[in-house]
Amino acid sequence: MQNLKNSFPNKSKKELNKIGFKFYKHLCDLIVESIKLFSISQKEILKRLVVTNPEVMDHYYNQGKPVLLVGGHYNNWEMLAAGIDLQVKHKTVGIYTKLSNPFFNKKILKSRSRFGLKMITTREVTAYFEKNKDEPAATIFGADQSPTYNKKVYWTNFLNQDTAVALGTEKFSKKYDYPVIYGAINKVKRGHYTFTLSVLFDSPNDTKEGEISDGHTKILEQQILKQPEYWLWTHKRWKRKRKENE
């Protein structure tokens, strides 16, 4: 609720409570749907997660060019992880932070990779890109997490708050000249989602510093403002505060 208050200072307590109620209803759906992913069939996942315009990436695949897919924890990202590799030509790669509990870490990895998604840890990202830089892969970045203090960040305004944005998407897109594509997950109805692609930056090296980080942050913000109940409000997004020298 504090996240909602800070993000929507002009909304009344009644309006914020309404968003909060809708969020918890969606969160219950998210939990049940995520459990179902452990046993869902390929036929069923293709009905419940539909990539509406995979042809957006075909142009790059035909050139043998890798891309970066960027998005946020909006709607059901676990459903996306399970179903995306079946619907695009690029080999899809997901980045994750290893869980401290070995049992749950193994379960989550198995669920996300059942239908082809390759999973790598955050510590493996640099080595992975260097080794596979010429292979047509689509690497997925969840760019709305709160960066730790030991990482370089870009500061911007997000949902009415001073916000640190992880530089991974911008860093790797510029280093390897990979196009940046935003993926918007939309909820059609309970248990059913679409994933729509839009090219944000075709030539990353032509952008100014911070432009890529600002770009994907703002488009996620637009999604959240339209239907705020589908973002992960229980996440401590703003725990990192700007220091005087930042």
Image (tube, grey):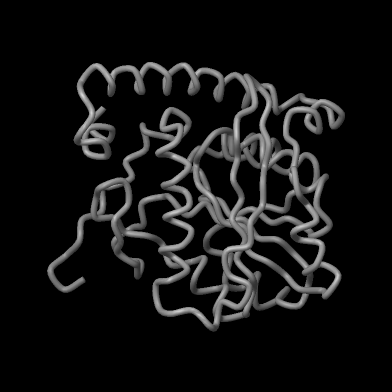
Question: As displayed, is residue 26 above or below residue 133?
Answer: above
Give the residue furthest to the left: 244
Residue at figure coordinates x 43%, y 35% from the top left: 232
Quadrant of the image occupied by residue 37: top right
Question: As displayed, is residue 116 above or below residue 206?
Answer: above
Q: Quadrant of the N terminus?
A: top left
Residue at figure coordinates x 81%, y 62% from the top left: 58
Question: As displayed, is residue 90 above or below residue 53?
Answer: below
Task: Give whichever of 99, 144 is nearer the camera.
Answer: 144
Q: Quadrant of the C terminus?
A: bottom left
Residue 181 at what x, y percent from top left?
62, 60
Residue 198 at what x, y percent from top left?
63, 56
Question: As displayed, is residue 84 above or below residue 174?
Answer: above
Residue 198 relative to residue 3: left or right: right
Quadrant of the image occupied by residue 237: top left
Residue 114 at what x, y percent from top left?
77, 39
Residue at figure coordinates x 28%, y 21% from the top left: 15
